[in-house]
Image (tube, rainbow, N blue to C red):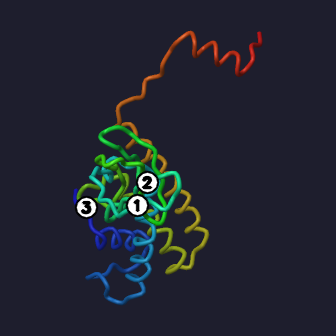
Amino acid sequence: MSYDKLSICNSALIRTGNTPVAVEGDGSDEWMSASDAYDTMLPVMLQHHDWGFASTITTLNRSGASTHPDYTDAYYKPNGCFHVQIVWLNDTPCPYRIMDNQVLVNANNGVVTAKYIRTPGADQWPDTFVETLRLFVMAALYRGLNEDNGEADKLYDRAMKHMALASSRMSQEDSPRYRVNSRLLAARKIRRLGWTR
């Protein structure tokens, strides 16, 4: 199912007992409250978790020499980047630092790529993500438009729990990480924790 800002805001308005709007930016209190909540919470949600549907990989463009003493090269962060997840140098993960909105690495004339979170098209949003965003907008509407702080607090808490559930569901789409089971690791753990009977 495809979503957009107007449909999510109108759904939140209806669920909080308010009048939906016909068009975006109509100047009404309803639109200003819903739009502000949507614009505030969408980037917060995208930065909260390494959402698979919001992740992409791109080659970075060098901006010049790094001013940081531990890194030689500075690269532009990708447009629309909320959060860098990993950086590769010639397809191998490498150390990096974000400073002054740039990615710093020791590139040695290699190819630098990054996996990052950006705002995907609303047609790519899973239903659980959309419902969480709607709950956050509803909480803001209860607080600002309906002046019901008690209901706003309840819905905000519900939205936070829903976001944790959505994060967990999205994480299940990744391949599992297998634990290394070895006698050496077990022995180290016993020494570190101490052996008790």
Q: Split into 4 quadrants, where in the image is the C terminus?
A: top right
Q: Residue furthest right?
A: 196
As measured in the structure, the alpha-carbon distance from the residue carrying label 3 to the one carrying label 2 is: 35 Å
Which is in the foreground here, disc 3 or disc 2?
A: 2
Residue drawn at point x = 25 percent, y = 55 percent: 124
Residues at marks 1 and 2, CA–CA distance in whole angstroms: 6 Å
Compare residues 95 and 110 and report the one nearer the observer: 110
Quadrant of residue 43 within the rendered picture: bottom left
Which residue was labeled with disc 3? 121
Label 3 sits on a secondary structure element that is loop
Give the secondary structure at mark 2. loop
Q: Which residue lies furthest to the bottom in this view?
A: 27
User: Does 20 sit left or right of 105 as displayed?
Assistant: left
Mark 3 surroundings within 10 Å by alpha-carbon count, few (fewer than 14), some (14 through 19), many (20 or more): few
Mark 1 / mark 3, whichever is N-terminal:
1
Q: Are marks 1 and 3 in contact (CB under 8 Å)?
A: no
Which of the marked residues, 1 or 2, is nearer the chain's N terminus? Answer: 1
Please tell me the numbered disc located at residue 65: 1
User: Closer to the camera, 60 or 82?
Assistant: 60
Type of the residue with mark 2: Thr
Label whose residue precedes the other's in the sequence (3 or 2): 2
Horizontally, residue 22 falls left or right of residue 49, namely left
**Residues packed near mark 2 inside 10 Å, few (<14), some (14 to 19) or many (20 plus):** some
Q: Which of marks 1 and 3 is in front?
A: 1
Please state the horizontal and vertical placement of residue 61, each as a whole percent of the image. Answer: 29, 59
Q: Name the residue under label 2.
A: 72
- Residue 116 spot, x, y in % from top left: 36, 53
